[in-house]
Image: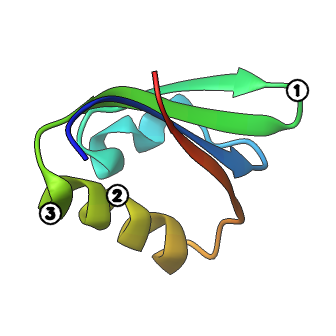
Amino acid sequence: MKGKIKIKVEGHLDNNWEHWFNGMDITHEGDNTILSGNVKDEAFMHGILNRIRDLNLKLISVNPS
């Protein structure tokens, strides 16, 4: 997967986490957090998903934007 992506996770992450998610933008939609930005390759995408897993966040969706 390459290009712009929108990842939704349950709960609220503070904007200070942007550096941990390689500069992806953090916004909020209701009780959920939206991570959005450009994905340069699959390895980058897997890295983001691994960090979501490591933080024990509930992944809601991953969509191209």
Q: Position of residue 28 (x, y in %)?
A: 71, 25
The residue under label 3 is 43
**Residue under the point 33% across and 47% down:** 21
| C-alpha distance separating marks 1 and 2 | 22 Å
In front: label 3 or label 1: 3
Q: Amino acid at mark 1?
A: Gly
Q: Residues within 10 Å of mark 1 (few under 14, many from 20)?
A: few
* Earlier residue among tags 1 and 2: 1
Q: Amino acid at mark 2?
A: Ile
**How was this image coloured?**
rainbow
Q: Residues within 10 Å of mark 2 (few under 14, many from 20)?
A: some
* Earlier residue among tags 3 and 1: 1
- Labels 2 and 3 touching (C-beta < 8 A): no
> Would you place residue 52 above or below residue 54 in this image?
above
State the image quarter where residue 17 is shown.
Answer: top left
| C-alpha distance separating marks 2 and 3 | 9 Å
- Labels 1 and 2 touching (C-beta < 8 A): no
Residue 48, which numbered label? 2
